[in-house]
Image: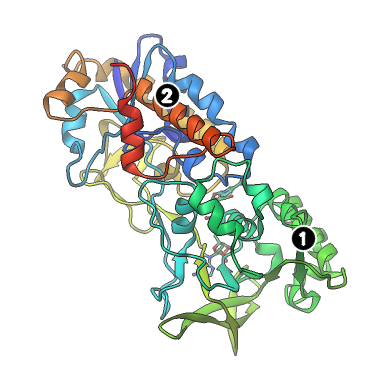
Amino acid sequence: MRVAVVGSGPSGCYTAQSLVQLDSEVFVDVLDRLPCPYGLVRYGVAPDHEKIKSLQGSLRTVLEHDRVRFLGGVRVGGPGGVPVRRLRELYHAVVYCVGAATDRHLGIPGEELPGSWSATEFVAWYSAHPDAVEAGFLTGVRSAVVIGVGNVAVDVTRMLARGAAELSPTDMPQAALSTLAASGVREVQMVGRRGPSQARFTTKELRELGSLPDTEVAVDPAELALDPAYADPSGLPAPQRRNVEVLRGWAERPPAEAAHHIRLRFCLRPVELLAEGGRVGAVRFERTAPDGQGGVTGTGRFEDVAAQLVLRSVGYRGVPLEGLPFDTASGTVPNVQGRVVRGSAVSPGEYVAGWIKRGPTGVIGTNRPCAKETATSLVADAPALVRKAVPDDPLAVLRAAGIEPVPWAGWQAIERAEAALGASLGRSVVKLADWESLLAAARTAAP
Ligand code: NAP
């Protein structure tokens, strides 16, 4: 059986792994739009989270399995991409593991002002994503507002407070490192629309903010107390209770001198981004009050927070893939245990795993059971799927159509080029940040 897995992030790799483990006769091609594998592990996990980044080692083992083949630089769907329908003809089954490729919007006036960016755009820049833009994110910025209190908000807040010494051992591209290290950002306010007990960050990530060198983390106890669970957190589930305890500890500390100040704010919802000199100058928030049912209501009281940089970190969102059904409300592909549903019926040979299957939640490890469920469905369907005639080798068909994928050896050549770049800069590995350099490096691989 020949299976295509579209996307080489954690969900794609775990799907390929489950498939080869569950079926000794399956051959898996893992296709990726980029010449580089690993998806958000390479392009989303913060560069200073070396331990999580090291997961690339176990994903590599999957892609080097003798029944798994990496085909980089192959776009599926969209302009110039292999149409979904065509891909379906080349394989007995296709599993879409394409993640949640865009960000959610706030839908408030001023959102598109210069200086207002989605966290996704900022993360892509410092992670060397080849589609990222060098947008002068930090030019003239003294204070920043991060909207949202999830783990991505914590990541971007932390990166804004990091100095050269901490960034230099990472694989961050040199230009982003120099910009961040030289930035004039002194204050970052990270703002949640609900109370501290409803924040989405995890305690480990929250605590890390408190251990940043030369950085003060401040929380206003009066603002925390707007959340009734703050006074008595005993009824909260353990993760939320731990968050509240960490915040309480910070709220009780006296102010301190530091180069960077991080302020965690709660019960403020953004209503407008205000312009100053043609770009964002402040965010107008409305004070909220808990509604007793986990939500909040507006109070009609407003507060403007000055910021020359606004990072909107309010979650990711799945993008429809032409030729696949899509549920716009959830931003996912309708499915039953990973089997794609078209109309009211399961579509034979089409599957999903990861964020495009269940929405953008959970940590990397959450993708393991999710992928396993999908692979199990596929393997159960295999007797019917293999009745379909497919080409002996889909790669030959792709090549005949003018598509020349970047093979695993091409990726290994990129890795060597990144190690060489790092060595030339007196750093360890440094990522190549543009399409041209990535493809040029890939071409140096022996045929
Ligand atoms: P998230 O956890 O869903 O957090 C989104 C945040 O945005 C929440 O605070 C949410 O508030 C807020 N928000 C949503 N709409 C809003 C609006 N209109 N106005 C104001 N605030 C709004 O999303 P994420 O931070 O992007 O993370 C995505 C997933 O990746 C999560 O599962 C996360 O744990 C994971 N991740 C993990 C790590 C790690 O383990 N180190 C790092 C990065 C990401 P409400 O709760 O009120 O909706």
Q: Amino acid at mark 2?
A: Gln
> Which quadrant does the C terminus fall into?
top left
Residue at left 80%, top 75%?
Answer: 221
Q: Cα distance, mark 2 to mark 1? A: 38 Å
Looking at the image, is 303 positioned above or below residue 38?
below
Residue at left 44%, top 36%?
Answer: 9
> Which quadrant does the N terminus fall into?
top left
Q: Nearer the viewer, residue 376 or 226?
A: 226
Label disc, if present, on residue 29 of the rendered structure: none
Looking at the image, is 443 positioned above or below residue 192?
above
Q: Quadrant of residue 234?
A: bottom right
Q: Earlier in the sequence, mark 2 or mark 1?
A: 1
Looking at the image, is 66 positioned above or below residue 52?
above
Q: Quadrant of residue 90?
A: top left
Secondary element under disc 2, as helix, strand or loop, is helix
Q: Quadrant of ligand 1?
A: bottom right
Place of residue 40 in the rendered image (x, y in percent of width and height, measured from the top left)? 48, 42
Place of residue 154 in the rendered image (x, y in percent of width and height, measured from the top left)? 63, 57
Q: Is residue 195 left or right of residue 18?
A: right
Q: Quadrant of residue 423?
A: top right
Label 2 crowd bin: few (<14), some (14–19), many (20+), radius 10 Å: some
Q: Residue furthest bottom?
A: 300
Residue at left 57%, top 58%?
Answer: 180
Residue at the spot of label 2: 412
Q: Nearer the viewer, residue 98 or 212?
A: 212
Label disc, if present, on residue 214 of the rendered structure: 1
